[in-house]
Amino acid sequence: MQEFLQYKIAELGSVNISVYNLFMAVILLLATWLLLFFTKRLIYRVDKFDEGKKYALYRLSKYILLVISIVLILKVFGVDVTVFVAGSAALLVGLGLGIQSLFNDFISGIEILLEGTIEVNDIVEIDGIVAKVREIGLRTSYVETSDGIYVFVPNSILTSHKLINYTHEKAESRFHVSVGVSYNADIELCKKIMIKCAEENPLSIKEPRPYVRLKEFGDSSVILDVLFWSRDIFIIDDIKSEIRQEIFKEFGKHNIEIPFPQRTLHFDKTAIFNAESTK
C-alpha cells in the first residue's frame, strides 16, 4: 500500500506528482468544499445580518478558504510557495500600469463587500441605467436591467462613478410624472386629478400621500409634477406609464387641454409674387 501511494506519476524539477500527492489534493479539495458548505449554513443562520451582509461575508470567506486551499495543495506537490509569490510580485511590478485597472477593480470589490453600500438585489442607477444587482464578484459585478439584459460592470466603476442606490437603508423612493396643461386650465382641478391618479395606482404608496408641485411656466403650457412614492423601483417606468395614461383619460373627461408646441409660418407675399412674375 505504501509503495502504491509513493508511486510517482510524473516529476517536474522539484515538483513530484505521486498517488499520495493526488490523494492529499483530493482530500484538501473535499475539506475545502465541506468548510464552505458549513460556513455558508452558519452565516445564513445569523438573524442579525440582512441578506446582503450574509452574501458579502460568505463571499469573503469563500475567497479566503480557496486561497488557503490552493497554497496547501501547491505545498503538497512540493512547490515552493515563497518563490512563487516572489516571482508573482516581480511579474506584477514588471506589468506595471498594465494591471493597474485590474488591481483597482479587485480592491473595489473587497471595499464593496466589506462596506455593504451595494448589496445583491439592490436597485441602482449607473450612468442613467436602472438595474438590479445580481452578483458582486471580486473584480466585476453583474446587474440586470428592467429589459432583462445582463451587464457586467467593473467594480471600480461602482465605487468611483456617481451611483444612485434606490434601496439602500429604505424600501421606497420618490418619483414624479410631469404634465403640461393649458394656461386656461383650472390648476386646482388638475392637481386633484393628478393626485387621484397617483393614489389609485396599486403600486404607489398611500403614505406619504402623493402631491402636486407647479414646476414651471413653459412656452405653451404650465408644467405640473405629481410626486409619489413606490417600493417597486425596478418597474417604475411601467408605473409612470400607467399614471400618465390615467391622467390623460381623466383630463379628457374634464376637457382639460394638454397643449402641444405649434409654430406659425409667415410668408412674404410680395417676394412670392415677384418670384412668380420673373418666371
Image (tube, rainbow, N blue to C red):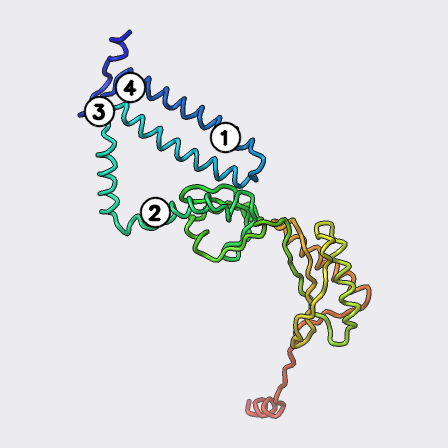
The residue identified by callout 1 is 40
Residues at marks 1 and 2, CA–CA distance in whole angstroms: 27 Å
Residues at marks 3 and 4, CA–CA distance in whole angstroms: 10 Å
Q: In the image, which disc is placed on residue 75?
A: none
Q: Amino acid at mark 2?
A: Phe
Residue at left offset 51%, top offset 38% = 55
Side (left or right) of 13 relative to 207:
left
Residue at left offset 25%, top offset 20% = 17
Residue at left offset 63%, top offset 85% = 266
**Of callouts 2 and 4, the N-terminal one:** 4
Q: Residues within 10 Å of mark 4 (few under 14, many from 20)?
A: many
**Of callouts 3 and 1, the N-terminal one:** 3
Question: Which label sits in the foreground, 4 or 1?
Answer: 1
Residue reaching furthest to the front: 48
Q: Residues within 10 Å of mark 2 (few under 14, many from 20)?
A: some
Residues at marks 3 and 2, CA–CA distance in whole angstroms: 30 Å
Q: Residues within 10 Å of mark 1 (few under 14, many from 20)?
A: some
The answer to whether residue 153 is above or below residue 78 is: below
> Residue 259: percent from the left, percent from the top?
71, 72
Question: Where on the picture, by quarter, is residue 208?
Answer: bottom right
The residue identified by callout 4 is 21
Q: Quadrant of the N terminus?
A: top left
The residue identified by callout 2 is 103
Side (left or right) of 23 relative to 260:
left
Q: Amino acid at mark 4?
A: Asn
Q: Quadrant of the C terminus?
A: bottom right
The residue identified by callout 3 is 15
Question: Which label sits in the foreground, 1 or 2?
Answer: 1
**Of callouts 1 and 2, the N-terminal one:** 1
The answer to whether residue 276 is above or below residue 172 is: below
> Residue 47: percent from the left, percent from the top?
58, 35
